[in-house]
Image (cartoon, helix red, strand yellow):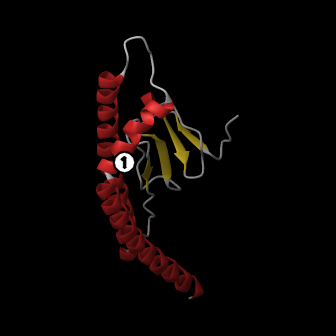
Amino acid sequence: MISNRIIKFNRHKSCLLVSRNASTTPDTKSIQPPNPRRISSDMVGPPDPVSNLRKVIFRIPPNETELERKYRELRTEVQEWNQKFWEKHNSRFYQEREEYLKKNMPTDKQNLTADEMSVFYKAFLDKNWKLHLNYNVEWYKKNFALLSLAIRVKLMKLFRFKD
């Protein structure tokens, strides 16, 4: 059973919205993106079929400061960058895997064994190691920038509440 605190249903627009802590994936046929100004918390969508990442719609608070806006926009930018990378990477992986299967599948078999497929997986990882290394370096840079902004936003909120 799904808790009402996790999923919100908008009858007028026929959409399901899953809050950030939910693990339930709604039916993707009826999902419409929510208005970030009208939601009460960040919303997480279903996994993308290619990238396997979940899109997050970040809430825009009514009295958003310049620093909070900058942080939210950077989070969105990093999410889009990550989505593009994994969409491209996974598409290439699926395509190359299909080509490998067509070339190496014996006519009398339906599937290759895990050991037989490991040859492809190793070759794919070896071929893309530099791409993964560059991705990881860039990912760390982006996360440190996000962390820096997040700390500044938290400190600003802390000092605002003290006043």
Is residue 24 in view from this perspective? yes
User: In the rendered view, would you say 9 is above or below 146?
Assistant: above
* Quadrant hosting residue 74: bottom left
Along the line of sight, the residue nearer the viewer: 88 or 10? 88
Q: Quadrant of the N terminus?
A: top right
User: In the rendered view, would you say 114 is above or below 54?
Assistant: above
Q: Position of residue 146 (x, y in %)?
A: 41, 70
Along the line of sight, the residue nearer the viewer: 60 or 95? 95
Q: Position of residue 92 (x, y in %)?
A: 29, 39
Q: Position of residue 29 (x, y in %)?
A: 43, 28
Q: Quadrant of the C terminus?
A: bottom right
The residue depicted at 41 percent of the width and 35 percent of the height is 49
Is residue 32 in view from this perspective? no
User: In the rendered view, would you say 71 is above or below 52?
Assistant: below
Q: Position of residue 89 (x, y in %)?
A: 32, 45
Q: Is residue 107 left or right of residue 61?
A: left
For disc 1, the neighbor class at 10 Å (few under 14, some 14 to 19, many from 20) is: few
Along the line of sight, the residue nearer the viewer: 154 or 121? 121
**Secondary structure of the residue carrying numbered label 1:** helix
Q: What amino acid type should be assigned to the residue bearing mark 1?
A: Leu
The residue depicted at 43 percent of the width and 33 percent of the height is 117
Which residue corresponds to mark 1? 125
* Quadrant hosting residue 77: bottom left
